[in-house]
């Protein structure tokens, strides 16, 4: 036997009660009562980077790698790598990208997904590189919102303790 | 091939003097004629804890069928059911549970999912079922139950609809992605436009962003204030431009009031062939055009090419514009072009009476005006300032001299109505349907949002950063 959980008419109060005791009743404007519980869900995926693997291995070695279409007539260069060319379908090869470029666009996130809330505020930037046909999305550090502008010269930094993640690289304003 | 429509311009009421232009090209027929005969929507709310997704859909469905005595559930040949995220439901194959809750077994169904455009795709899936002749009557039903997790966890679920190798781990935040897009849009069209003469680069960009934000805020004011007359809306409110600008900064330069929220809600539409439409209602609405488009999942992969032109544009308009880059939605342009071609529309801003547009962000509403050819690329900010997308007869607190030219989001859009993803595109279909039927007053209990003599409208549904877009054009199917 378990006593009926407490009843609330505000959804926020339900959420607070769930944090404490895991169950609550919600009564709506028509007097209908609904039982609400916490229902946890966690999982560790066995995630393969598959054909993107060389990029992340590269970051861990302090290398920024893009890809270039192998078909000479195409030769499209991608800053965010892909193993086959989106323009012509041919396989690509790995190339080293320049480690400095310019911000194509930027933002400062004052909120984020739950997983990243504790890191706010953080800057995101799409970086363009000379002679490269596509962009790279990165974190931009050592700069605050009021420093940032489109076309700002930036350069790469690599995490000395890499975690095989996009956060193993970030950019800073070019000194 | 259907005959070229021979309709004469009817005179407008005093409220709306300019007659709508007639279509000038022959519509492209694709399959059987398809009509919408009814629809229903639950009120969109932060949370509906007393209804799960099945009951929400049932409520919208019962509302839809209530008005049509001949349309009983046995007349429905099958369904298309949409919801965006299994993470939110934590119930896979939830559409099966909707199907049985509505008593539709053993009729055919399939679940539709396409990110933020899920509802718009469901509408078109139902269209296709009828146009192809596979069904005579198809129910399109959609829902989302986003209240089941805290807001920032919900943002995480949504951001999982971005590349989880390259984009999500950086902060996984859709508002951030749209902020990246609007900062570039402002750069292309305000920094290099109105502020082209400012010498100091950083000063020019700050001025351009301030100007862009002011104009985006006018869109937010419009949608929130339109919704004051829509009882289904989640966040109707009277706001000023300063209220919007001064609301909490979420991802620079986007503030809280420029962003739609998470919602619980459901919506349904019933589409059918011509014979059934005439039997069910004397006020059917015909679906005269459908279009879809896509773009790369990652913003970083968007090309810098040429603009696919609308019939009323010239290549020389855009000689120096790298397109779409991250400033515009190529998928929206593709969807618009396809839908307009099928509907025989060449001048959308004069041949459509209104658009229910996927304004997940005030910024993306402005970007979409341009994609859909309501104005040229680069003219979106001026389009707002001149007042074209505003409603006549509502005082927004600033001048809107051309109000009523082509009202966008007369219902209040996503920003004010809410965005229960799988229902949103269908909600637009229902609001557009009522608008074209002339039954807004009946369903809203308030005539303020009824456009006089609305004959043709479009609905526009959009998935993350414009990775997929649908446009459907609806036209009044009765005299």
Image (cartoon, coloured by chain):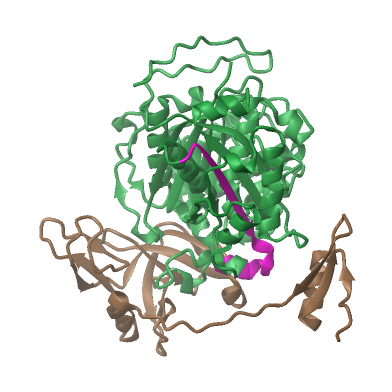
Chain colours: A brown, B green
**How many labels, in total?**
0
**In the rendered view, does B308 fall on the left or right side of B109?**
left
Instruction: Give the residue at x 78% y 31%.
Output: B446
Identify the residue at image location x=84%, y=71%: A25
Q: Is residue B199 visible?
A: no
* B269 is higher (above) or lower (below) than B144: above
Q: Is residue B148 magenta?
A: yes
Image vertical order of residue B104 relative to residue B338, above or below:
below
Question: Magenta segment, which residues?
Answer: B135-157
Left or right placement of residue A30 versus residue B153 in this view: right
Of all residues shown, which one is farthest toward the left? A72
Q: Position of residue B405 (x, y in %)?
A: 58, 24
**Viewed as shown, does residue B168 lie left or right of A52?**
right
Q: Nearer the viewer, residue A134 or B58?
A: B58
The outermost residue toward the bottom is A161
Can you give x and y, in whole percent of width and height, for residue B120 in the image?
Answer: 51, 45
Quarter of the image containing the N terminus of chain A? bottom right
Q: Is residue A165 magenta?
A: no
Q: Is residue B159 left or right of residue B452?
A: left
């Amino acid at each position: 036997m378990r006593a009926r959980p407490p009843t609330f008419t505000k959804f926020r109060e339900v959420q607070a009660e769930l944090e404490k005791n895991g169950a609550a009743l919600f009564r709506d404007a028509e007097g209908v009562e609904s039982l609400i519980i916490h229902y946890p869900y966690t999982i560790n995926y066995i995630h393969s980077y598959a054909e993107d693997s060389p990029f992340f291995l590269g970051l861990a070695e302090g290398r920024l790698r893009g890809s270039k279409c192998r078909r000479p007539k195409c030769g499209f260069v991608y800053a965010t790598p892909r193993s086959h060319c989106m323009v012509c379908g041919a396989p690509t090869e790995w190339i080293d990208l320049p480690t400095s470029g310019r911000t194509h666009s930027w933002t400062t996130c004052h909120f984020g997904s739950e997983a990243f809330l504790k890191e706010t505020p953080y800057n995101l930037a799409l970086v363009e590189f000379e002679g490269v046909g596509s962009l790279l999305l990165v974190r931009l550090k050592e700069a605050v919102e009021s420093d940032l502008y489109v076309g700002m010269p930036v350069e790469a930094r690599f995490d000395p303790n890499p975690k095989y993640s996009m956060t193993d690289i970030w950019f800073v304003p070019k000194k | 091939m259907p005959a070229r429509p021979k309709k004469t311009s009817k005179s407008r009421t005093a409220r709306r003097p300019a007659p709508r232009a007639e279509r000038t090209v022959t519509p492209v027929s694709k399959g059987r004629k398809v009509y919408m005969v009814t629809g229903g929507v639950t009120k969109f709310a932060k949370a509906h804890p007393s209804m799960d997704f099945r009951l929400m859909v049932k409520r919208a469905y019962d509302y839809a069928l209530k008005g049509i005595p001949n349309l009983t559930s046995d007349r429905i040949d099958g369904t298309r059911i949409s919801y965006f995220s299994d993470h939110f439901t934590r119930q896979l194959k939830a559409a099966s549970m909707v199907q049985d809750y509505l008593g539709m077994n053993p009729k055919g169904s399939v679940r539709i999912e396409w990110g933020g455009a899920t509802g718009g795709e469901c509408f078109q899936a139902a269209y296709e079922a009828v146009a192809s002749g596979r069904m005579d009557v198809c129910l399109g039903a959609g829902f989302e139950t986003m209240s089941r997790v805290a807001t920032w966890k919900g943002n995480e679920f949504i951001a999982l609809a971005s590349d989880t190798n390259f984009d999500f781990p950086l902060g996984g935040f859709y508002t951030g992605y749209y902020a990246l897009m609007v900062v570039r849009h402002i750069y292309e069209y305000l920094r290099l436009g109105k502020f082209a003469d400012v010498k100091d680069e950083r000063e020019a960009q700050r001025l351009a962003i301030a100007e862009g934000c002011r104009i985006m805020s006018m869109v937010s004011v419009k949608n929130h204030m339109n919704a004051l007359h829509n009882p289904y809306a989640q966040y109707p409110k009277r706001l000023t431009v300063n209220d919007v600008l001064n609301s909490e900064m979420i991802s620079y330069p986007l503030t809280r009031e420029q962003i739609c929220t998470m919602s619980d809600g459901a919506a349904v539409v019933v589409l059918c062939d011509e014979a059934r439409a005439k039997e069910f209602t004397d006020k059917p609405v015909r679906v005269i055009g459908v279009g879809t488009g896509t773009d790369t999942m990652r913003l970083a992969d968007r090309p810098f090419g040429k603009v696919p032109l609308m019939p009323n544009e010239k290549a020389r308009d855009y000689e120096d514009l790298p397109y779409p880059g991250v400033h515009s939605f190529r998928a929206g342009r593709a969807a618009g072009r396809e839908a307009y071609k099928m509907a025989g529309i060449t001048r959308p801003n004069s041949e459509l009476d209104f658009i229910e547009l996927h304004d997940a962000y005030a910024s993306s509403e402005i970007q979409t005006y341009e994609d859909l050819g309501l104005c040229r690329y680069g003219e979106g900010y001026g389009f707002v300032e001149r007042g074209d997308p505003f409603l006549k007869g509502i005082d927004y607190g600033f001048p809107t001299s051309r109000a009523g030219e082509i009202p966008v989001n007369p219902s209040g859009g996503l920003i004010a109505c809410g965005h229960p993803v799988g229902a949103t595109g269908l909600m637009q279909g229902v609001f557009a349907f009522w608008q074209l039927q002339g039954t807004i007053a009946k369903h809203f209990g308030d005539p303020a949002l009824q456009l006089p003599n609305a004959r043709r409208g479009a609905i526009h549904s959009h998935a993350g950063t414009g990775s997929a877009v649908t446009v459907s054009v609806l036209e009044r199917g009765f005299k």
